Image (cartoon, rainbow, N blue to C red):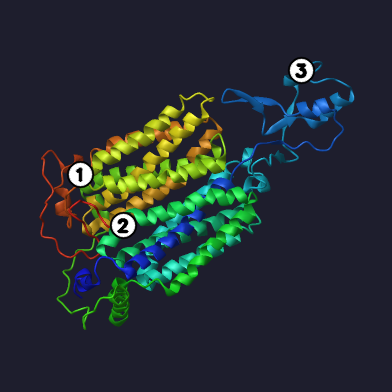
Amino acid sequence: MGDYDDDTAFLGQSGPYFWTTFFLLNVVFVSTGFNGLYIVFVGAAPKHHCLIPDVNLTEEWRDAIIPFTIVDGEEVQSQCSRYKIDVVRNLSAQGYIPGREVNLTTLEQEGCLDGWNYSKEIYQSTIVTEWDLVCDNQWKVPFASSSLFVGYLVGSLVSGQLSDRFGRKKVVFMSLGVQCLSVLLQSFSHSWRMFCIMYLWVGASQISLYISAFVLGTEVLSKTMRVLFTTLGAFLFYCIGYMTLPWIAYGIREWRTLVAVLSTTSLINFPLWWFIPESPRWLMTQGRIKEAEAIVREAASKNKVQAPPVIFKESEELPLFKTYTMLDIMKSKNLRCITLMCLLLWMAINIGYFGLSLNTSNLSGNPFVNCFLSATTEVPAYIVSTWLLKICPRRVLLSLFLIIGGGVLLLIQFIPDTLHNVALALEMTGKFGFTMAFSIVYIYTAEIYPTVLRNIGMGMCSSAARVGSITAPYVIFLGTYNKVLPYILMGSLTIASSVVNLFLPETLHKDLPETVEQMQKCQGLCSGPKKKKCIRNAAIVNPPIPCEAHSDGQALSL
């Protein structure tokens, strides 16, 4: 078949058809913002201490039965122990007064044998309060969070194959259905294990939905609309759902009801089946030319342009490319070095991004406001990054925002506990830096790899990102031992990755490399002592995947 963009150039670059499709596809991304991070509220741990059974104790002994311990330099009530009930009951019956006639530090302690008493000041119930995920079972909360990101990994590996076989549109709405059902079933979880299993399905369906809708948009929209869709539209509509989540959680403080309500947010997207088209590009790869032409003719009708009698013309076969695998990346020292640096970058950015996103419930102040602020910081980050990518070198830009993100995290530990607002502002600044880095690294990595290895390289980096996001909940869990540990670890890793990034080749105002040979001629640490510039006007054949570049160096969808 001929070149799709040339064959459909008569549609123009905008018009009612493209704008309608752009908006409807972006609406789908709103539900991913709702269902991505509700664990922040569902898995929150309210203030708690050992439950005291209804035994005969004086008021003084009932108030003193919970020992005090030192946490981060502050004296607070113990959350995991109490003075032994039998001992306290005997002392109370004998009329002793705690603290004056009895030295409490000498009394024997025991665990919370009768359960825990949880504060309902903020949450009526969470999975922590329902299944007592505290003290010895505290590790189960980050494990539950990680199950979402394990689902991301599974969905990333499976969704591409499914959409290539069954079509982009079918996989989008199949993923919507699985997401809706799995979130709903999660609200009926009878155990922590069932919650984690369903959360894995939530993650797999959500990332499958995101990727499939992203690919569908890039294949259906015009070149101009595609730039807006891939660099701004999808991210901003995700942020709309993310920013709305804390206010839904604010109105619904019971976790089962909250999750059930969130499951219904996917339902409003199902009527879009009759308005969102299938990808004509995919239909053509399946030999369904008539169906592809029908969609393009409908687009012409909506855009009020005349379609030619024959849209897709027969032409010479496309040149065949050598098939590459992951082993080919490992064979070349240059490719191996660049890939290892990219893997570190993606892992560090995802640990920082998801670590700060999951940490909003642990910050001082209102957790709902904190989550909203965390989501709001992403909006200017996506807008600013889209503009800066047109004019700024990728290497310097990415390192700059990695230093901003990691630097402020290292500064937080020096902020006094009394200056809560300053610490919150620094954390939001860090989130802004990580979001900027998050949006830049996608385009930067796509511009580094040649066409013949781009899918493989991006797939490996995406897997590293999933490993980073799976690790993020456990990094935050370190805060239970010392509240500054997560910031030190995330900040140090980010600063180190910003230095590594400086050794990658620059890609601004350079054509996308098509072959491994063109990539190896780009100047960077791994390219050897000779300074060679990237080929700017290489003879580029049509790539086997839809990938393009403009003169401003901004890569489009993969």
Q: Is residue 558 visible?
A: no
For the point 62% across and 57% down, which residue is it?
Answer: 187
Residue that carries the numbered disc 3 in the rendered image: 103
View extreme (front): residue: 304
Which numbered dot is residue 175? none
Amino acid at pointer 1? Glu
Residue that carries the numbered disc 2 in the rendered image: 228
Residue that carries the numbered disc 1 in the rendered image: 506
Local SS, label 1: loop
The x, y position of residue 65, in whole percent, is: 76, 28
Could you give the CA–CA distance between mark 3 and mark 2, rounded to whole angstroms?
69 Å
Q: Residues within 10 Å of mark 1 (few under 14, many from 20)?
A: many
Is 185 left, or right, of 87 in this rendering?
left
Amino acid at pointer 2? Leu
The x, y position of residue 341, in whole percent, is: 29, 43
Q: Are marks 3 and 2 in contact (CB under 8 Å)?
A: no
Instruction: Choose mark 3 or mark 2, whichever is in front.
Output: 2
Could you give the CA–CA distance between mark 2 and mark 1, rounded to whole angstroms?
23 Å
Amino acid at pointer 3? Asn
Q: Residues within 10 Å of mark 2 (few under 14, many from 20)?
A: some
Is 195 left, or right, of 405 in this rendering?
right
